[in-house]
Image (spheres, helix red, strand yellow):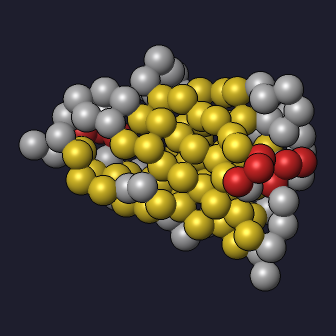
Amino acid sequence: QVQLVESGGGLVQPGGSLRLSCAASGFTLDYDAIGWFRQAPGKEREGVSCISSSYGSTYYADSVKGRFTISRDNAKNTVYLQMNTLQPEDTAIYYCAASPIRTVVISPYDYRYWGQGTQVTVSS
């Protein structure tokens, strides 16, 4: 059974950090681009970051550029999202997704597998 499982979310104060993990099972994510998306209450889903399968090319939304870093450990079948200098506007449910397109993928419609999400709350 194919699964993506996110973990690492939680409550953090503004300026703090979290590292999200996206662990795959039932398939190997070596050949997939992996993306992180987020959705806050009352807002549309937003693409946050993506890492390609080939050459490790990355994409970051302007809102997180310079604060978030995406990386992958194919040996662990896991992708990470390091989030630094978190702000209240980063509060959302964060989802990871896998796409068979090997390059950076921005459209959520190009992703075939999705995780269940992990809540990130930034508040003092």
**Quadrant of the rendered structure where residue 86 is?**
top left
Above or below: residue 57 compared with residue 81 = above
Q: Quadrant of the N terminus?
A: bottom right
Q: Is residue 96 visible?
A: yes
Residue lying at the far top of the rendered structure: 66
Q: Nearer the viewer, residue 99 or 22?
A: 22
Figure check: 66 above or below 116? above
Q: In the image, what residue occupies the spot 64% across and 47% down? A: 79
Residue at horizontal 66%, vertical 66%?
A: 4
Q: Is residue 109 visible?
A: no
Q: Going by the picture, which residue comes out furthest to the bottom?
A: 1
Residue placed at 89% from the left, 40% from the top?
Answer: 102
Residue 87: % across, % down: 27, 33
* x then y, percent, for residue 81: 53, 40
Q: Nearer the viewer, residue 41 or 86?
A: 86
- Answer with left or right where residue 62 lies relative to residue 86: right
At 59% from the left and 27% from the top, the residue drawn is 60
User: The C terminus is located in which quarter?
Assistant: top left
Residue 37: image location, x then y, percent: 56, 48
Q: Is residue 70 left or right of residue 20?
A: right
Q: Quadrant of residue 97?
A: bottom right
Q: Is residue 72 left or right of residue 29?
A: left
Residue that lies at the very extreme toward the front in this rendered image: 75
Looking at the picture, does residue 58 appear above or below residue 102?
above
- The number of discs equals 0
- Residue 121 appears at what percent x and percent y? 27, 51
Side of 22 relative to 3 (left or right) = left
